[in-house]
Amino acid sequence: MNSLSHSHGREAVDMDTQRREKILILASIFCISALAADKILLPPLINLWSARNLEITELGESLVKGKSLLGRETMMKSRWREMKNSALPQNITEAENLVLKAVDRWVQESRIQGTSFKFQWRDNEENYSLLECRASYVGTMKSIVRFLYELEVDPLALKLEEVELSPRDESGKSVLLIIRFTGLLFVEEKQ
């Protein structure tokens, strides 16, 4: 009986050892699989996740900008109509005369003295032409400020591009103003 219990005990120990071996093998396989997943699968998945998060963020920002633009659509259309209406007239001669009359009006309002005035057309843009005007004037600082104010508030589509000021006398009472401004004419409206 002793040998029977002894062999039965040995079989139980062998079964426990086999079970432990199986558990250790399974635990080793699990650990190796986890390590392989961490080194091989996880980095690409993390990179993919990060790229998707970045793309979602960019799309969200684009959506916000789009909604903002749609919200401003009415105001922008109104501003565009205003720009087209205040642009120089279709007839080039009429456009030039209109600018000359505006400049004369600014000179009258500001009491500034003109020394030169030249203009030329720049047709190198696709959707519009520009009437580029260069002028120089002499006056007091007050008259120059008034002249520039009149230019800026004029309803014509004119843009002040360059301003240069320099004193004409030692006291600084007489100042030379050299300016360049442009007028807008839409090409599609030109005859």
Image (cartoon, rainbow, N blue to C red):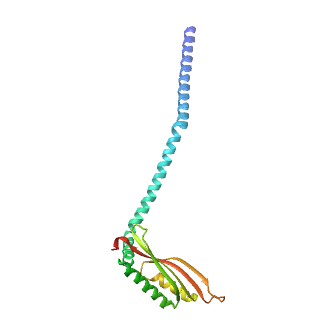
Which part of the image, by quadrant, shows the C terminus?
Answer: bottom left
Which part of the image, by quadrant, shows the N terminus?
Answer: top right
| Most foreground residue, 5 or 85 | 85
Q: Is residue 146 above or below residue 22?
A: below
Residue 92 horizontal/vertical position (percent): 38, 78
* Numbered disc total: 0
Residue 17 horizontal/vertical position (percent): 56, 20
Q: Is residue 76 above or below residue 98?
A: above
Residue 65 horizontal/vertical position (percent): 43, 62
| Most foreground residue, 64 or 136 | 136
Residue located at (51% from left, 89% from top) = 110
Residue 75 horizontal/vertical position (percent): 39, 72
121 sits left or right of 7 in the view: left
Residue located at (35% from left, 78% from top) = 91
Quadrant position of residue 6: top right
| Most foreground residue, 124 or 107 | 124
Kindly give the residue lying farthest to the right in the view shown. Answer: 170
Q: Is residue 76 above or below residue 45?
A: below
Quadrant position of residue 24: top right
| Most foreground residue, 27 or 99 | 99
